[in-house]
Every structure is written in structure tokens, then in C-alpha cells.
Amino acid sequence: MTTQTRKVAIVTGASRGIGAVIARQLAAQGFAVAINYASSASEASALVVELRQAGHQAIAVRADVASSADVTRLFDETEQQLGKVDVLVNNAGILKVMPLAQHSDELYEQTFAINTRGTFNTLREAATRMNDGGRIVNFSSSTVGLNLPGYAVYIASKAAVESFTQVFAKELRGRQITVNAVAPGPVATELFLYGKSEEQIQTFAKMPPLERLGQPEDIASVVSFLVSPAAAWVNGQILRANGGLV
Ligand code: NAP
């Protein structure tokens, strides 16, 4: 166990997309960061090198958030190498757009395993292993407010995350740990862009009154706020960040 000098943050799904930018911003805020990933080992290692070269503390930990054993090991390795956890960002997630009637059993299970059970696994672990005074940020989606065709299973998996957020904030009474969720609108990452035509992408980009897609930085700055002392009184909330889409 190292002597803990910096506060410690775990960011799930931080090898790329929004999670990688969150990891950069939290490191810049002074956190030692555990970069979790499932399969993108080279991206996760490159991010660790980048952060260490900039003078930050960072490690990469492979763990499938859908596996409770992997999540226990994620906390074990983080504690051993960085110290006890102060911040948990449950960013890992998948999206497969498909009408409900065409969803296979496997795809339904996979979406709920990663988006919903993955969040459940880390929250359960966090309950006994996080420092008092910590911060938890879960990831929902603004699609919960839009109810778009093709998104039923994804939306349902994220609606459950919103419920976890609101109840878990109350269950942590006395610990001074806040639990909130960010619910982004469309953000220009592989998760959103994959499989969409340029026309479909532009249609989404024009939907919010601010008339553009979100960038990972737009969402990472909301996370930075929620884990900062400035957000001490924000608890049990779902914060939609989507340019005014819904
Ligand atoms: P992304 O670019 O596809 O990145 C997803 C990240 O999650 C990757 O680092 C991936 O790592 C990781 N991941 C996937 N399955 C995992 C698992 N089983 N265990 C651990 N890590 C896993 O996605 P993104 O757009 O950044 O999305 C981040 C979050 O924002 C998700 O929860 C998503 O639902 C939410 N969100 C995104 C948008 C959007 O428009 N982009 C909108 C609303 C909400 P590997 O490559 O190693 O698998």
C-alpha cells in the first residue's frame, strides 16, 4: 500500500471516448486516476503514459464492469497502487440502436450487464470501500427524456441507473458521499457515431437549440464540477447536459 498523498478517482470505461477526457480532467484537478477498460489495453496504457509524463499519478486496470469479481479486483488494485477511493465515475457503457422487436436475448443481456449491472457492481463495492466525503457520478443518457424509437433497451438500462442514483444517495446517509448522474445528449464519440450516416448525424446535431453535437469535454466538465467542492450541496440529482435538447 502506498502512502496516500492525492485523492483517488476510479473512472470506468476510460480508455477512450468521454471517459478518457474525464480521466485527463480529474488528473488535472489533482486526482490520482485509475483508468478502467475492458478490451482497449493499448489506448488505456497510452493514456497512463500521457498522464504520468504530465506529472500525474495514473494506473490502468482491465476489468469488465459486468463481472462483480472484476470490479472487486478493480477496487483492490486501485487501493494497493493509489490508495482508498474518493471518487467513482461510472462511465462505462454500450449502445446498440435497434427496435425492441429485433433485440436478441444476448443483446438485451449485454446491454443490461454492462450499463445496469456494471453500475450496480461498482456502487455495491463503493458502499464499503470508499472514503467518507467522496463523490459518485453515474452515467445516464438524455434519451431517457426523448424516448426515441430504437433506443428502448438502452433507455431502460439507463433509467435503472437513474433510480440507483436517487436511492443510493439516500442509502449513504451519514457518509457525506454524494451520488449524482450525468445524462448527456449526443456526444461525438464512437458510441454515438458508429453506424450512423452523415445525414443522421447532422439531424441529431441540429436538434438542440445550441445546434451542435456535444464533445467529450462538455460532459467531462460537468463531472469535474460534480466531484469538486463547489458541488457539495448537489446530491441525488440527474444532470442533463445536452445543449437544451430535452
Ligand atoms: P465509447 O466512446 O464507446 O467508450 C466506451 C468506454 O467504455 C470505452 O472505454 C470502453 O472500453 C468502455 N467499456 C465498454 N464496455 C465495458 C465493460 N464491460 N467494462 C469496462 N469498460 C467498458 O462511449 P462514450 O460515448 O464515451 O460513452 C460513455 C458513457 O456516456 C456511456 O455510459 C454512454 O452510455 C454515455 N452516453 C454517451 C452518449 C454519446 O452520445 N456518446 C450519450 C449519452 C450517454 P473498451 O474499449 O476497453 O471496451
Image (cartoon, grey):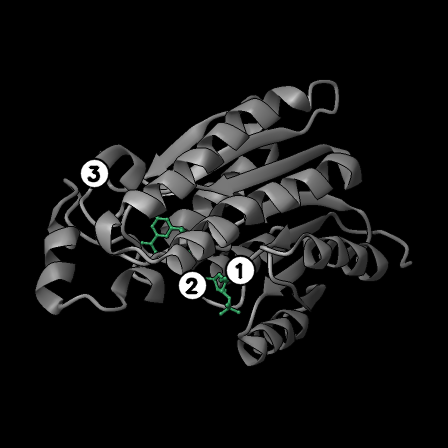
Q: Residue at x 27, y 33 (%)?
A: 145
- Work out whether residue 35 or residue 156 is closer to the camera in this orientation and state it: 156
Within 10 Å of disc 2 (Cα), the crowding (few <14, some 14-19, many 20+) is some
C-alpha distance separating marks 1 and 2: 8 Å
Q: To which residue does mark 3 refer? A: 245
Q: Indicate which disc, 2 or 3, sits on the residue closer to the N terminus.
A: 2
Percent x, y for residue 35?
62, 63
Q: Is mark 2 within 8 Å of ligand 1?
A: yes
Q: Residue 217 is drawn in which quadrant?
A: bottom left
Q: Which residue is mark 1?
A: 13
Q: Which residue is mark 2?
A: 17
Please give the label number shown on residue 30.
Answer: none
Instruction: Please state which amino acid type lies under the numbered disc 1.
Output: Gly
Q: CA distance from mark 2 to mark 3?
A: 21 Å
- Compared with 193, 91 (above or below) is above
Earlier in the chain: of badge 1 and badge 3, it is 1
Instruction: Indicate which label's residue lies in the foreground, 1 or 3.
Output: 1
Query: Does the image show residue 30?
Result: no
Instruction: Determine crowd level at label 3: few under 14, some 14-19, many 20+ residues with C-alpha closer than 10 A.
Output: many
Label 2 SS: helix
Type of amino acid under label 2? Gly
In which quadrant of the rendered view does residue 36 lie?
bottom right
- Confirm or deny contact between disc 1 and disc 2 (CB under 8 A): yes
Kind of residue at badge 3: Leu
The spot of residue 160 in percent (x, y) is 45, 35
Relative to 213, 78 lies left or right: right
Q: Is residue 195 visible?
A: yes
Give the quadrant of the C terminus. Answer: top left
User: Which quarter of the rendered image does ligand 1 occupy?
Assistant: bottom left
Q: Secondary structure at mark 1?
A: loop
